[in-house]
């Protein structure tokens, strides 16, 4: 076991042991409260530019497999755990986590007090940090952290988006209709999905609901999307500051009113900006599978999976926009819809794998909206 250091921007130093790739990894250190699904977290492109801390203490006990990946590869910069489990035991396991991280150049650190780190992030906010297995001088590492780039104003989407358009046909293996209405969906809908850091399970859910999906790069001009004559347009999740991807905001602004639009996470923020709203950075973000969200249209509470560090300013939204969902922890905006155009979005992840699945109905809402507007 090789010694490693985690040095935070405020000067805090954690000593532990390296696992995965060797070297130095710089990024914004954040935490995720999920108890399961670490492989899905690792491969969520929304973590590009970040060092992810797992609050659940034992990680790696299930190994890794090909089915649970959410993208082409892990995009996070570093991984922090209390205890790395070196002997995975699961019937689906195809390899160990350390080898997986090493293969993709992800630097990890284990053996630190992740509870103390989480409390630090909650009190002082998400900060820049570094994990190092090479330079073990805290003062030297702190200087490097201070000179490293943050995530505000940085386009992290281009690094994770696809290079060329492609079609997607795979559904979920264990999907069952959520209602009689969804089970009777016979129509096929043509959907163009903007890839801002798209998770595979979103594509599987769209396919389950009868969509023929074409995925396009984040910088695809709106005229090319309209030339495909889709029934609907999907705006995906993705990493970083939504205001930094002004090209996507301008594209979506052009598409509003021309097609049915559904956005998730970063897609929700981009849609809000395109509608004239504003976004801001949260102190430490929402990352986990246990976030309570209230649906203001039904009065029901959903337990949701979330991963974002920015939010939409409620006061910046115009009178033609309804806020449909709010976070019950801090009352931040979790969903919107336009009063006149067939567009809506949510901040959280209704496709969440391994769960929860309280918000899966939103995909059927997208289907229904396309039906009524085509």
Image (cartoon, rainbow, N blue to C red):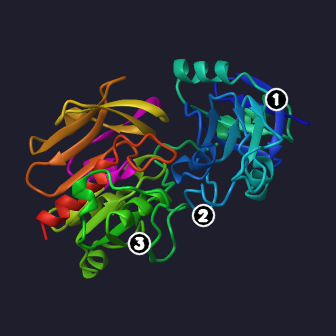
Residue depicted at 59% across the width and 18% down the height:
119
Label number found at residue 72: 2
If the image is split into quadrants, where does the N terminus sit? top right
The C terminus lies in quadrant: bottom left
Is residue 278 one of those drawn in magenta? yes
Checking the image for residue 216, the label placed there is: 3
Q: Residues within 10 Å of mark 2 (few under 14, many from 20)?
A: few
User: Mark 1 or mark 3, which is nearer the start of the sequence?
Assistant: 1
Q: Look at the numbered disc 2 and give the secondary structure of its residue.
A: loop
State how far apart marks 3 and 2 are (Cα). 15 Å
First in sequence: mark 3 or mark 2?
2
User: Is any part of residue 141 visible from this angle?
Assistant: yes
Task: Write the residue at 20% across / 55% down.
Answer: 343
Question: Of label 1 and label 2, which has the lower sequence position?
Answer: 1
Q: Which residue lies furthest to the right in this view?
A: 1
Could you say whether the residue bearing mark 1 is in a helix, strand or loop?
Answer: strand
> Residue sitting at 34 percent across and 48 percent down?
360
Please say if the residues under marks 3 and 1 sit with CB atoms less than 8 Å apart. Answer: no
Range drawn in magenta = 263-285
Q: Mark 1 points at which residue?
A: 16
Q: Position of residue 22 (x, y in %)?
A: 83, 48
Say if 283 sits above or below 351 in the image: above
Q: In this view, does 286 lie to the left or right of 146?
A: left
Left or right? Give the position of 152 relative to 139: left
Query: Are dots 3 and 2 in contact, CB under 8 Å?
Result: no
Q: Which residue is drawn at 69% across and 40% down?
A: 79
**Quick check: can you spot residue 197?**
no
């Amino acid at each position: 076991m090789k010694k490693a250091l985690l040095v935070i921007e405020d000067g805090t130093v954690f000593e532990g042991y390296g696992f995965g790739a060797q070297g130095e990894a710089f990024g914004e250190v954040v935490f995720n409260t999920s108890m399961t699904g670490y492989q899905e977290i690792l491969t969520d492109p929304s973590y590009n530019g970040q060092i992810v801390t797992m609050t659940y203490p034992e990680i790696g006990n299930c190994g890794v497999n090909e089915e649970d990946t959410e993208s082409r590869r892990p995009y996070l910069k570093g991984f922090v755990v209390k205890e790395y489990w070196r002997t995975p035991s699961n019937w689906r396991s195809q390899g160990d986590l350390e080898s997986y991280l090493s293969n993709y150049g992800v630097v990890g650190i284990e053996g630190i007090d992740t509870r103390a780190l989480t409390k630090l992030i909650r009190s002082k906010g998400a900060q820049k940090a570094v994990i190092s297995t090479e330079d073990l001088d805290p003062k030297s590492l702190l200087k490097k952290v201070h000179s490293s780039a943050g995530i505000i104003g940085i386009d992290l989407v281009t690094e994770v988006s696809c290079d060329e358009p492609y079609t997607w046909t795979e559904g979920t293996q264990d999907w069952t209709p959520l209602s009689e209405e969804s089970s009777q969906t016979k129509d096929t809908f043509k959907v163009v999905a903007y890839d801002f850091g798209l998770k595979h399970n979103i594509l599987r859910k769209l396919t389950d609901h009868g969509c023929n999906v074409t995925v396009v790069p984040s910088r695809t001009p709106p005229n090319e999307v309209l030339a495909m004559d889709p029934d609907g347009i999907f705006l995906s999740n993705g990493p970083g500051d939504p205001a930094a991807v002004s090209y996507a905001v301008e594209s979506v602004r052009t598409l509003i009113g021309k097609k049915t639009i559904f956005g998730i996470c970063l897609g929700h923020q981009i849609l809000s900006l395109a509608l004239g709203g504003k976004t801001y950075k949260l102190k430490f973000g929402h990352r986990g599978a246990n976030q309570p969200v209230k649906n203001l249209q039904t009065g029901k509470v959903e337990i949701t999976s979330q991963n974002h560090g920015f939010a939409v300013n409620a006061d910046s939204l115009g009178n033609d926009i309804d806020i449909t969902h709010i976070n019950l922890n801090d009352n931040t905006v979790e969903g919107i819809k336009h009063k006149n155009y067939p567009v809506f979005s949510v901040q959280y992840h209704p496709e969440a794998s391994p769960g929860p699945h309280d918000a899966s109905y939103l995909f059927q809402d997208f289907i229904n909206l396309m039906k009524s507007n085509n």
